[in-house]
Amino acid sequence: MAHRTRMQEQDPTWCTFAALALLGSHTQPNTPYLRYFVATVLAATLGDMNYWYHMQPYYDIENINLPDVKGRGKQGELVGGQQLMDAGRVYFEDGATLDLGKSMSFKNLERYKNTKARAGLRLMRDDQRQFFRLAVQQAEAAYNIKANHPLFFYWMQDPVAETMSYKASGLSHALMAVFGHFVLNLLLVAGAALAFSKISHKF
């Protein structure tokens, strides 16, 4: 369009700017599409990270076969880990306590101290699973016990709200990225308009 506008003896400034804004600066002969390449890589990388850290755990929890179970079965019997292999959210009955006599901890990032917590949200991130397994292995060695089917949960008060926060975080990060790209382009257009106005005044 810039070339066509120039052939029609009209001002091709804005068409040229739009082309450069899309494809990148041609002032560097070895990297004519550098800006376009960087933008594409950043979009793919940030989008993948947003999905990995926020949306994928949300979808995994929502698509799990048995999302909500109680600490006991329908007949009041105790429920073991093997029976809850597909549990996403677990709610323990009032009065349920931890067997601190066989407890073991491994602190990596967070520490849980919510005295009102009576539920668990299933761990869905594989990059954190090794730390949970480490605590299990330490407990097995310390107390001479065997955990055949260990399940890993985040101890919390409201796992439903936490699940929805994954979705909200993913959406907010996506919107911030779109807004940031809009602001960047707005600044570029404003800067170009100012520069072009000064050039036109000179001539």
Image (tube, helix red, strand yellow):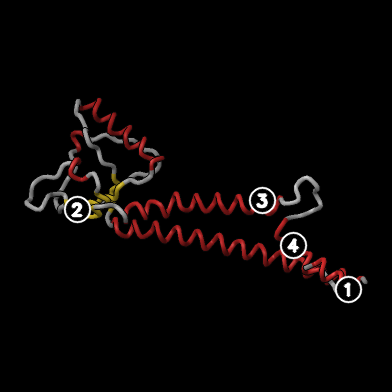
The residue wearing badge 2 is: 69
Q: Which mark is residue 68?
A: none
Give the CA distance from mark 1 to mark 3: 32 Å
- Where residue 96 sits in the image (x, y, percent)? 15, 48
Q: CA distance from mark 4 to mark 2?
A: 57 Å
Give the amino acid type for the residue marked by disc 3 in the picture: Phe
Instruction: Report the amino acid beneath label 2.
Output: Val
Q: Quadrant of the N terminus?
A: bottom right
Q: Which residue is mark 3?
A: 37
Viewer-proximal residue among 132 and 75: 75
Q: Give the distance between the C-alpha atoms of the residues marked 1 and 2, in whole angstroms.
A: 74 Å
Of labels 4 and 2, the one closer to you: 4
Left or right: 43 with respect to 100? right
Q: Which mark is residue 19?
A: 4
* Pointer 1 residue: 9
Q: Earlier in the sequence, mark 1 or mark 3?
A: 1
The structure residue drawn at horizontal position 54% and vertical position 52%, both measured from the top left corner, is 46
Please name which of the two marks, 2 or 3, marks the residue nearer to the observer. Answer: 3
**Spot occupied by residue 56 in the image (x, y as percentages of width and height):** 40, 52
Earlier residue among tags 4 and 1? 1
x and y percentages locating residue 30 in the rendered image: 78, 45
- Quarter of the image holding residue 10? bottom right
| Mark 3 nearby-residue class (10 Å; few <14, some 14–19, many ≥20) | some
